[in-house]
């Protein structure tokens, strides 16, 4: 797994596959369990927790049953301190955005992408995906439609970020008369 944290002027790369032994845990590690914790990033920082599933002989049962490999405690790694988190522009995991700074706020891109997968489909800018989710959920739930705060919470962003995304997307829409204007204007027939 590869985690990239972008700051203004630098990118830090954390790679769990490189520069480490193939089996960093005791026993025969058959499976690794990684958790990227960013829920309270600006208060607690960014943490990566790694556990392993060791296939130890002591877990093997007599008979024809399938042997078990149980999770063993691993380690927590602080990838960014709370102070550093304030300067994060984005975090990507294996090439997919997880967090991004939008209108000055860290936005849970992974949560928005999961909601888009369920409701609106992928594609477009982050602000565009937020607006599509807003429209979809507003049509599906009157309570969410009536409260921008509840809507923002449902999407996983702040009300300010929702409002700014809506404004930014609205500013990109081209008025119909400009779009359908006389494209030949200024040219004369010979």
Image (cartoon, helix red, strand yellow):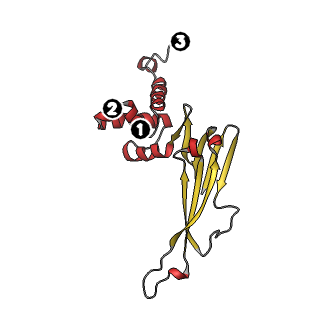
Judge from the rendering whether residue 142 lies leftward or rightward of residue 55; answer left or right: left
* Quadrant of res 83: top right
Percent across and percent down for residue 164 are 48, 28
Q: In front: mark 3 or mark 1?
A: 1
Which is more N-terminal, label 3 or label 2? 2
Percent across and percent down for residue 181 are 45, 17
The Cα–Cα distance between marks 2 and 3, rounded to whole angstroms, is 46 Å
- Mark 2 and 3 residues: CB-CB less than 8 Å, in contact? no
Taking the spot 56% from the left edge, 40% from the top edge, the residue there is: 100
**Residue 102 in sight from this viewpoint:** yes
* Helix, strand or loop at mark 3: loop
The Cα–Cα distance between marks 3 and 1, rounded to whole angstroms, is 50 Å
Q: In front: mark 1 or mark 2?
A: 1
Per the image, the residue denoted by label 2 is 145
Count of numbered circles on the image: 3
Per the image, the residue denoted by label 3 is 186
The Cα–Cα distance between marks 1 and 2, rounded to whole angstroms, is 12 Å
Taking the spot 59% from the left edge, 64% from the top edge, the residue there is: 74
**Numbered label attached to residue 153:** 1
Q: Residue furthest front?
A: 43
């Amino acid at each position: 797994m590869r985690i990239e944290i972008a700051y203004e002027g630098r990118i830090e790369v954390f790679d769990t596959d490189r520069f480490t032994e193939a089996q960093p845990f005791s026993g025969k590690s058959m499976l690794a369990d990684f958790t990227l914790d960013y829920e309270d990033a600006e208060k607690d920082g960014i943490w990566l927790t790694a556990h392993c599933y060791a296939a130890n002989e002591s877990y093997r049962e007599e008979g024809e049953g399938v042997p078990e490999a149980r999770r063993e405690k691993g380690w927590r790694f602080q990838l960014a301190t709370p102070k550093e988190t304030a300067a994060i522009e984005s975090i990507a995991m294996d090439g997919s955005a997880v967090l991004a700074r939008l209108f000055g706020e860290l936005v849970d891109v992974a949560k928005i992408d999961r909601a888009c997968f369920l409701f609106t489909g992928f594609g477009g800018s982050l602000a565009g995906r937020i607006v599509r989710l807003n429209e979809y959920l507003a049509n599906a739930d009157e309570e969410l439609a009536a409260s921008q705060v509840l809507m923002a919470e449902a999407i996983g962003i702040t009300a300010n970020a929702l409002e700014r995304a809506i404004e930014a997307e609205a500013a990109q829409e081209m008025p119909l008369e400009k779009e359908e204007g006389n494209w030949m204007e200024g040219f004369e027939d010979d």
